[in-house]
């Protein structure tokens, strides 16, 4: 995929800055790649929900979707911490 072929920028100022990601470049790249996909999916859900659903239904859909996204990022962080 095009995102994987681009040179990854390892920033000490922006991003998910934990001890593990700051000390390991591969962990930094993996964590931010997963977080990028999750953020893109969440953004798509916001747009689609805003276009097709009423206000009450938007809140019903986006709450669980946001919690799932947070869970996926946390699970990836814990999984790669064990490796």
Image (spheres, rainbow, N blue to C red):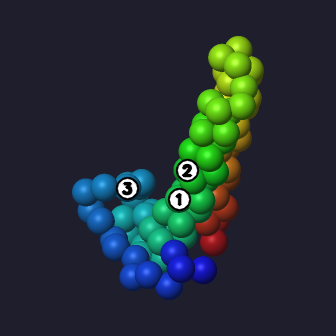
Q: Quadrant of residue 54?
A: top right
Local secondary structure at mark 1 = helix
Residue in the foreground of this view, choosing between 30 and 80: 30
Q: Is residue 20 above or below residue 48?
A: below
Residue drawn at x 59%, y 59% is: 37
The answer to whether residue 81 of the structure is visible from this angle is no
Q: Is residue 31 above or below residue 56?
A: below
First in sequence: mark 2 vs mark 3 = 3
Q: Which mark is residue 69?
A: none
Pointer 1 and pointer 2: residues touching (CB < 8 Å)? yes
Q: CA distance from mark 1 to mark 3?
A: 10 Å
Q: Which mark is residue 39?
A: 2
Local secondary structure at mark 2 = helix
Q: Residue furthest front?
A: 51
Residue drawn at x 38%, y 69% is: 23
Mark in front: 2 vs 3: 2
Image quadrant occupied by the N terminus: bottom right
Q: Which residue is mark 3?
A: 15
């Amino acid at each position: 995929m095009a995102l994987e072929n681009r040179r990854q920028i390892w920033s000490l100022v922006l991003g998910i800055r934990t001890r593990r990601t700051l000390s390991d470049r591969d962990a930094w790249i993996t964590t931010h790649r997963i977080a990028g996909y999750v953020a893109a999916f969440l953004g798509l859900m916001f747009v689609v929900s805003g276009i097709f659903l009423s206000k009450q239904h938007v809140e019903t859909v986006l709450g669980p979707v946001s919690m799932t996204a947070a869970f996926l990022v946390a699970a990836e962080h814990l999984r790669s911490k064990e490796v």
